[in-house]
Image (cartoon, rainbow, N blue to C red):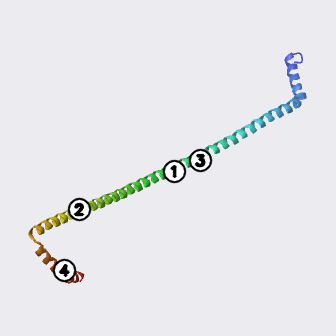
Amino acid sequence: MFQQAGFWYATSFVLFFAVFGPKIWKPLTQLLDARADRIRVELEEAARLRREAEQMREDAMREREQAYAEANAVVEQARKQAEDMAAKARLDAEEMLRRREQMARDRISAAERAAVEEVRAAAVEAAFGSARRVIGETIDAQSASAFIDKAIADLPASLTAHAA
């Protein structure tokens, strides 16, 4: 057995690790532990960043929902204002139409009254003209003088009758 190379290889291997093992093992474990620590820190940082990203996403979703609700409220308010304005405009237009219609009726009534007055004035003129002609043709100067004297005499009685 001491003559075989495999024995000496195995013995040198065991002695090598027995003598140098602690010196190699300690830096190797420290290197692996440092790498594990670095990986652990990176994993914790990634988890923290993920939590922050999820929080930011939730905040953005909440803000989007609030903005959507606000936009709907603004649209609803604008629609209500437009409906109110349309109703007010409709009422104003109806009121203006009623006023114009009343003004037209007043103008028509005034025109009718003016026409009636013109017709009356023309009728009075025609009546006076006809009365003058008839009186002029039928009454002579002496009869006219008698009528005037009688009218002057009856004037005080007629004025007191109209005054009462």
Viewer-nearest residue: 106 or 150: 150
Q: Left of 95 or right of it: where is 112?
A: left
- First reached walking from the N terminus: tag 1 or tag 3: 3
Q: Name the residue tied to disc 2.
A: 118
Q: Position of residue 121 (x, y in %)?
A: 22, 64
Q: Is residue 67 above or below residue 119?
A: above
Q: Along the polypeptide, which appears first: circle 4 or circle 3?
A: 3
Q: Name the residue under label 4.
A: 152
In the picture, the quarter occupied by the N terminus is top right
Quick one: label 3, few (<14), some, or many (20+) residues within 10 Å?
A: few
Between disc 2 and disc 3, the foreground one is: 2
Question: Helix or strand or loop: what does disc 4 sit on?
Answer: helix
* Residue pointed to by mark 3: 63
Rendered image quadrant of residue 60: top right
Task: Categorize mark 2 by other alpha carbons within 10 Å: few (<14), some (14-19), many (20+).
Answer: few
Residue 93 image offset from top left, x and y in percent: 37, 55
Element at label 2: helix
Q: What residue type is labelled 4?
A: Ile
In the image, taking residue 97 as reference, residue 113 lies left or right, namely: left
- Please state which of residues 29 and 119 is positioned toward the viewer in this rendering: 119
Choose top left, top right, bottom left or bottom right for residue 24: top right
